[in-house]
Amino acid sequence: MKFEKTSYGNKKGILKFPDHYVNLAITVSDEGVSTVNGKKVVPAGTILGGGVLEDDTVHAVVATTDQESEVSNAEGVLFNDVDVTHGPAAGALLIHGFVALDKLPVSPTAVEKAALKQITFLK
């Protein structure tokens, strides 16, 4: 029988102002996610895209950005860590709000910031 350890610690928050934000329910893809300590986790604060705003049956993927043409498919910021070890999993995509840059795993590029018109990134 296999048992999994459950952690009941506090969640990592990415918001600068936690009383003003809008999230959208999404499914996070497990494609391209690296395994660390036997788990595949997409961290909170990851910039996601892939067409989830236009089609809710599409799985959200890590956003791709072409710096040369200044085009990004970024659509939002992952609100909480999502464990995709056993396949695509439910998550929340922040589409409007104020995000603290120091709480993100990787800072968004200028092109990603421009694509995320309703998200303000603050120090």
Image: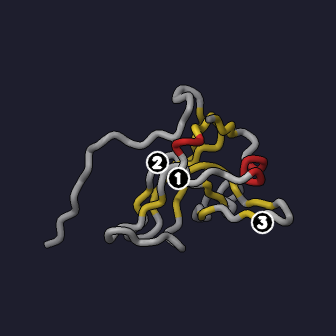
Instruction: Locate residue 44, reporting x and y percent.
Output: 49, 50
Q: SS class of the residue under badge 3? A: strand
Could you tell me which quadrant the N terminus lies in? bottom left
Taking the image as shown, residue 71 lies to the left or right of residue 74, namely right
Q: Rounded to the nearest whole Å, what is the CA distance between mark 2 and mark 1?
A: 12 Å
SS of the residue under disc 2: loop
In the picture of the structure, the residue carrying the numbered disc 3 is 66
- Please provide percent x and percent y for residue 36: 38, 68
Hey, what amino acid is under mark 1? Pro
* Residue drawn 81% across the image and 61% down it: 71
How far is mark 3 from mark 1, CA to CA?
A: 20 Å
Q: Where does the image place residue 112, in percent across and percent down from the top left? A: 72, 53
Q: Earlier in the sequence, mark 2 or mark 3?
A: 3
Are discs 2 and 3 less than 8 Å apart at CB?
no
Residue positioned 53% across, 53% down in the render:
105
- Say few, some or many: other residues with alpha carbon within 10 Å of mark 2 (under 14 / 14 to 19 / 20 or more): some
Q: Nearer the viewer, mark 2 or mark 1?
A: 1
The residue indicated by pointer 2 is 80
Circle 1 residue: 105
CA neighbours of label 1 inside 10 A, class few (<14), some (14 to 19), many (20+): few
Q: Residue at x 40, y 60 (%)?
A: 83
Q: Quadrant of the C terminus?
A: top right
Q: Taking 32 as reference, is 117 above or below it?
A: above
Quadrant location of residue 8?
Answer: top left
Tell me whether circle 3 and circle 1 mark residues in contact (CB < 8 Å). no
Q: What is the crowding at mark 3: few (fewer than 14 residues within 10 Å), some, or many (at least 20)? A: few
Three-letter residue code for mark 3: Asp
Q: Position of residue 6 (x, y in %)?
A: 24, 53
Q: What type is the residue that disc 2 sits on?
A: Asn
The tag earlier along the polypeptide, 2 or 1, is: 2
Residue 37, placed above or below residue 54: below
